[in-house]
Image: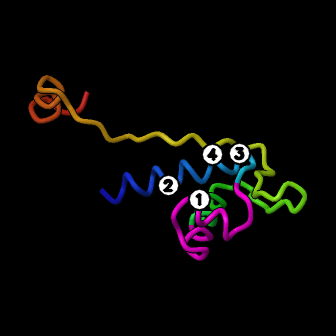
């Protein structure tokens, strides 16, 4: 599914940046299976959360310069029969 691919890719991008293992923009895009322009769209999305991302020529990696932390969680899960009945029959608990 597309949404899971997006979340997983965003998680990988963020992890590589935090570990300072991105390489150049071209190398980074290859590592995550994107074109450079698609990679920059993901980086812009991360920056929309006020996460400062810059390229460090000495480290040869993109780095996070802000003190903010991004926690990516997948909020989608399968409900068991009891939970499904609660949602359908009595409202969300």
Q: Which residue is mark 2?
A: 9
Which badge, 2 or 4, is on the more N-terminal residue? Answer: 2
Magenta-drawn stretch contains 27: yes
- Please report contact status of discs 4 and 3: CB closer than 8 Å, yes or no: yes
In what quadrant of the picture does the N terminus appear?
bottom left
Above or below: residue 90 compared with residue 22: above
Q: Secondary structure at mark 4?
A: helix
Inter-mark Cα distance, 1 to 2: 10 Å
Q: Main secondary structure of the magenta part?
A: helix
- The residue at which mark 3 appears reads as 18
Q: Earlier in the sequence, mark 4 or mark 1?
A: 4
Proximity of marks 1 and 2: CB atoms separated by less than 8 Å: no
Report which quarter residue 58 is drawn in.
bottom right
**Whole-Å distance between the Cαs marked 2 and 4?**
10 Å
Q: Residue 57 in the image: x percent, y percent? A: 87, 63
| 3D distance between C-alphas at marks 4 and 1 | 12 Å
Pointer 4 residue: 15
């Amino acid at each position: 599914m597309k949404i899971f691919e997006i979340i997983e890719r965003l998680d990988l991008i963020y992890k590589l940046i935090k570990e300072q293992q991105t390489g150049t923009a071209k190398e980074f895009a290859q590592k995550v299976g994107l074109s450079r322009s698609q990679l920059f769209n993901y980086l812009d999305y991360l920056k929309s959360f006020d996460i400062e991302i810059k390229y460090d020529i000495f480290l040869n990696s993109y780095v996070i310069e802000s003190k903010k932390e991004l926690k990516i969680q997948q909020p989608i899960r399968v409900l068991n029969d009891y939970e499904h009945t609660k949602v359908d029959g009595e409202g969300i608990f």
